[in-house]
Amino acid sequence: MDTPMGQPAVAAPQEVRVNFTTSSPDLQLPEDSSSLIVVPTDLKRYGLSRILNSSSMLNTSSPIPFDFLINGEFLRTSLQEYLETHGKNAEETLTVQYVRSLIPPVHQASF
Amino acid sequence: STHLEPELQLRDYEESMRRWANFQSKTHALSLSLTSQLRLILTPSQSTKLSGSYRTGKRLNIKRIIPYIASSYKRDKIWMRRAIPTKRSYQILLCVDDSKSMGESSSGELALESLVMVSRALTMLEVGEIGVLGFGTNVFTAHEFSEPFASHDAGAKVLQRFAFQQDYTNIRFLVRQTIERFRLARQQSTSRGSEDLWQLALILSDGLTPSSEHEDIQVLLREAMEERIMIVFIIMDDMTQKKEQSVLKLKKVKFLSNDEIKTEYYLDTFPFQYYLVVHNLEDLPGALAGLLRTWFAEVNT
Ligand SMILES: [Mg+2]
């Protein structure tokens, strides 16, 4: 709760604006889907991957695992931890570059 | 100030003075336009209500009919007329977003220009008291209701308070503070008892607030409405630098219960009923006047 007159109770920022970019021509977001999106800050690599694969984004038939780079650095933590360790906060838009994950793909049955 | 507020680093006074003068001359024509539009809306010359008891008039006063017959048609003041409107006075609070996101785009600059333009228009109208709040992590007073607002000095002192460095945008807290300050201001109001006091807050912000707070904000907005406090949200959406970053295009991730992920437009869950999206300063006078006209039409019916 807020104090009645003075300071608000400080709530941890729970969302951040992310601007998704990629340098792979085959992985571009469709024209009508926005690259600028508000996401929860507790997300890590897996959660961000799921968003990109979802029907309103890349709409992939089978999920592509992604890795993410912010300022040229691979994201290994949650977005919240990234913000904290880099002295940033949720007021700033994060430009997040996505690339196909280098982790070997899981076996997929052939059709 | 009676509020506990943190000491903020003030910007240079001389520089703020120059900026105020600069904004003022840049927005002068728009201020005049807004003044003439608002004059029609804020100071009505005709009352919409019929009342009183007269020998002739517009509509019968039903309550007078039985006494009229009982008095053998002697008490014949049975008609109502349009009453002379009660003089309205206003307390208007301009709330400017001082958070970092405002500085990241040029929305901060647009907000300050809008602040100068709107406050000048209201000052020229002389409809009542004007206050200015800043908000981000917390809320601070940049100009008290009781102080006059007609000088460059007052304006420069307001501009000194804004640096767009606050690390959080707490709009829920702003709305709560707005209600509390209006309650206090109503008690301290210098307007006569016969005058009709209206309280209006205009929030100038990029509109970005955690969506987890949207429901709480809606609850507070209902509270404000019950106390006849009107809150208008003016979304500053400057796109001159980044066209693809418009708040109109901004989406939000939604996790559905069946583990599916959807996106929806951020503004679809925006809690403010009365809001405008302003891309250019030139759009503001017409859009604001239109919105206030709609609101007054709704409360008068
Ligand atoms: Mg902000």
Image (cartoon, rainbow, N blue to C red):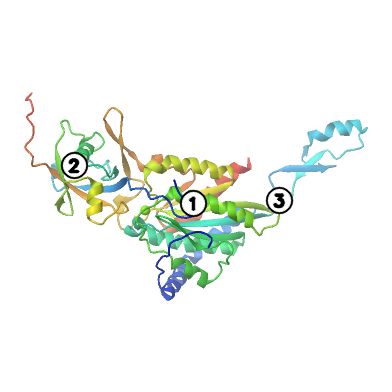
Amino acid type, label 1: Ala
Rounded to the nearest angstrom, the CA distance separating label 3 from label 2 is 63 Å
Report the residue marked by disc 3.
B85
Please rate how many residues cluster around mark 1, counting C-alpha atoms within 10 Å: few if below 14, some from 14 to 19, many from 20: some
Are circles 2 and 1 on residues that touch, CB within 8 Å? no
Q: The residue under label 3 is which amino acid type?
A: Pro
Q: Is residue A60 above or below residue B289?
A: above
Same subunit, labels 3 and 2: the answer reads no
Is residue B164 found left or right of A42 in the rendered image? right
- Location of mark 1 (residue): B287
Let me know if marks 1 and 3 both belong to one chain. yes
Q: Is residue B275 left or right of residue B253?
A: right
Dot 2 lies on which element?
helix
Quadrant showing the C terminus of chain B: top right
Judging from the image, mark 3 belongs to the subunit labelled B
Residue at horizontal 28 percent and vertical 52 percent from the top: A93
Task: Where is residue B163? Give x, y as percent.
Answer: 38, 64
Q: Secondary structure at mark 3?
A: loop
Which image quadrant for residue A49? top left
Which residue is depicted at the point 82% across and 42% down? B53
Look at the picture and state if B221 lies above or below B185. above
Q: Quadrant of residue B17?
A: bottom left
Mark earlier in primary sequence (1, 3): 3
Residue B75 in the figure: left or right of residue B41: right
Instruction: Report the mark closest to the observer, 2 or 1.
Output: 2
